Image (cartoon, rainbow, N blue to C red):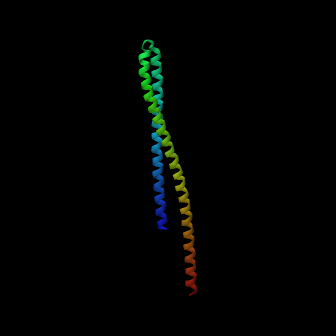
Amino acid sequence: MLEVTRREAAAEERLRGAVAREAELDGTERRLEAQWEQHRRWQEEEAMSLASSASAISTAGEEAAKALAARDAELADLKERLASRQAQISAQGESLNAMRELEVQLWGQAQSIAQYQQREAEVTAREAAVA
């Protein structure tokens, strides 16, 4: 019974750890989305700046194209990292579900053990009363 309680405590600790990791990943996801939005706004501002300066369009256009390519590469990297984080969150969710199922199984086993021990005690008491 004590071992079952220890297992339950360990399962709860793993569950808390998974929930904490999931919260951390959620925070990372929000930061990545904010960076993505910031990048998108930067692209819009850059485009408006280029349009307002007709005399510098050719020179600024080449520089902006390089900057946009670098930002697009950064954005692609951010999207890839976001997808990876989402996959991790999904995997942790599946792990959480598995831990919950294990917890239910352990609870059922603990109940069965308790019932068996009670029956055994009753039989022992009856045998002692007969003897």
In the rendered structure, the answer to whether residue 6 lies left or right of residue 101 reads: left
Question: How many marks can you see?
Answer: 0
Quadrant of residue 128 in the image? Answer: bottom right
Residue at the far top in the pictured view: 55
- Residue 85 in the image: above or below residue 94: above
Q: Position of residue 81 (x, y in %)?
A: 46, 39
Residue visible at 45% across and 12% down? 54
The foreground one among 47 and 99 is: 47
Residue visible at 46% across and 43% down? 25
The foreground one among 125 and 108 is: 108
The foreground one among 79 and 125 is: 79
Q: Position of residue 92 (x, y in %)?
A: 50, 49
Which quadrant of the rendered structure holds the C terminus? bottom right
Q: Position of residue 67 (x, y in %)?
A: 42, 25
Q: Position of residue 115 (x, y in %)?
A: 57, 70
- Residue 3 in the image: above or below residue 22: below
Residue visible at 51% across and 48% down? 91
Residue visible at 45% across and 26% down? 68
